[in-house]
Image (cartoon, rainbow, N blue to C red):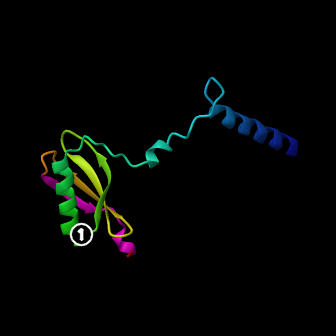
Amino acid sequence: MTSFIVKTGMISLALVLLASCTSDGTSQPPPMAAATQPLMDESVPPAARSACLAAVSNTANNGDVQITEMIFSEANSQVTVGVGPTRAPWRCLVSNSGVVANVMSMTNEGAL
């Protein structure tokens, strides 16, 4: 019975390793690896960026703000702003002309 389990485990491991290879034998990065990098979409207009920085600064009552991620959309762009020395994340939805639709802290404030 132990031999069967060992052989089954070895076959499973071999299948997993083969599944992570391309047809030319090179391995692929995990699909989620690219998602961990912040997106800095330069299509977000400067007016939208400035409006989000000001809105988050005013809402958080902290002038230490920096854009950490930007995602362009024709409806409302999303700008993530880091606040304070730890860059606590805040999300800002803003029109491309600079009208802020929503500002929200992404920090679990219940744990503070």
Apparent side of residue 84 relative to residue 3 in the rendered image (left or right): left
Judge whether residue 78 can be spotted in this image.
Answer: yes
Q: Is residue 3 above or below residue 64?
A: above
Question: Which residue is pictured at 81% across the width and 43% down the height?
Answer: 5
Query: Which is nearer the eye, 109 or 65?
Result: 65
The stretch of residues the image draws in magenta is 99-111
Q: Give the crowd class for mark 1: few <14, some 14-19, many >=20 residues within 10 Å.
A: few
Q: Position of residue 89 (x, y in %)?
A: 34, 61
Question: Which residue is pictured at 36% across the width and 46% down the height?
Answer: 39
Question: Which residue is pictured at 20% across the width and 68% down the height?
Answer: 59
Query: Which is nearer the eye, 100 or 62?
Result: 62
Q: Quadrant of residue 44?
A: top left
Q: Is residue 15 above or below residue 90?
A: above
Question: Which residue is pictured at 58% across the width and 35% down the height?
Answer: 28
Mark 1: amino acid: Gly
Q: Mark 1 — residue?
A: 63
Q: Is residue 53 above or below residue 6?
A: below
